[in-house]
Image (spheres, rainbow, N blue to C red):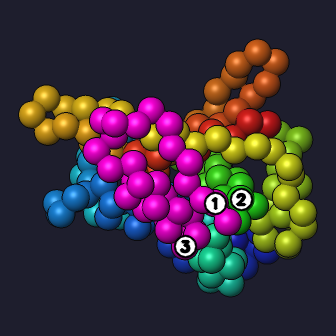
Amino acid sequence: MACKVCGDKNTVRSHIIPKAFAHEVRNGATHAVTASRHFKGTKPSQGGAFSDNLLCLKHERSTSATDKYAIEFVRRVIEAWGDRKDQTTLVVDNAQPHVMRSFALLTIWREIHSQHDTALSLGPYEDSVRHHLFEGDVAPNWAIVAQRTNFHLPGRGAVDFNLHPYRVRFADRAGWMLTLAGVAPFRRL
């Protein structure tokens, strides 16, 4: 397969959700548990889902600063939230909201083009999102809201997890949800 951006035949491994998030939720274990609507049950994974047919080295490297900022932001949310028992809301400084918006779009774009789910699409936004992510065009000015998940297991307490992007509909709008180490940004289109 070829790079989805430039057509280069030499593609590299691209994690749909950056591998650092799999390490966050492993919590010292050898593997994170991976679940998906694309397969039954769960399976162990050291670094999460990836595609070898998504991006060339140049375009994969172009995503690293965006991924790094998102990883650092999510870690600040996790640290600030603590045990999740005392706070119902939290404000965490996001000095570069445009980068978090780009990260949400990038993760959604990766999921769509990874061929894990051929039914997903950005529809009429495909070109503007791709041009923003890989050619530096202005990002669509869509709001992003993040929430901290509260999934608890008996005897273990709060458990963080990663959840790949999926579409949701509400009112007359479409949106995208994903969860990164227990932090769930919501992108409304």
Task: Identify the residue at the far front of this view.
Answer: 86
73 versus 184 height, above or below: below
Residue at position x 81%, y 18% in the image: 172
Residues 78 and 169: in front is 78
- Residue that lies at the very extreme toward the left in this rendered image: 155
Q: Position of residue 121 (x, y in %)?
A: 73, 41
Q: In this view, does 124 lie above or below 115?
A: above
Disc 2 to disc 3, C-alpha distance: 14 Å
Sequence-wise, which precedes: disc 1 or disc 3?
3
Visible residue check, residue 11:
no
Q: Measured from the top left, where is residue 101 in percent x and y? A: 71, 55
- Which residue is tagged 3? 68
Question: Is residue 27 in sight in this rendering?
Answer: yes
Place of residue 163 in the rendered image (x, y in percent of width and height, measured from the top left): 45, 43
Nearer the viewer's eye, disc 2 or disc 3?
2
Q: Choose top left, top right, bottom left or bottom right for residue 28.
A: bottom left
Query: How crowded is the residue under tag 2: few (<14 C-alpha within 10 Å), some, or many (20+)?
Result: few
Q: Give the range drawn in magenta.
A: 67-95
Query: In the image, is 4 to the left or to the right of 35?
Result: right
| Circle 2 residue | 97
- Can you say which quadrant of the picture contains the C terminus? top right
Mark 1, residue position: 94
Q: Is mark 1 on a helix, strand or loop?
A: loop
Q: Do the residues labelled 2 and 1 touch (CB within 8 Å)?
A: yes
How far across and how far down the image is residue 180, in percent? 46, 51
**What residue is rendered at 32% in x and 50% in y?**
82
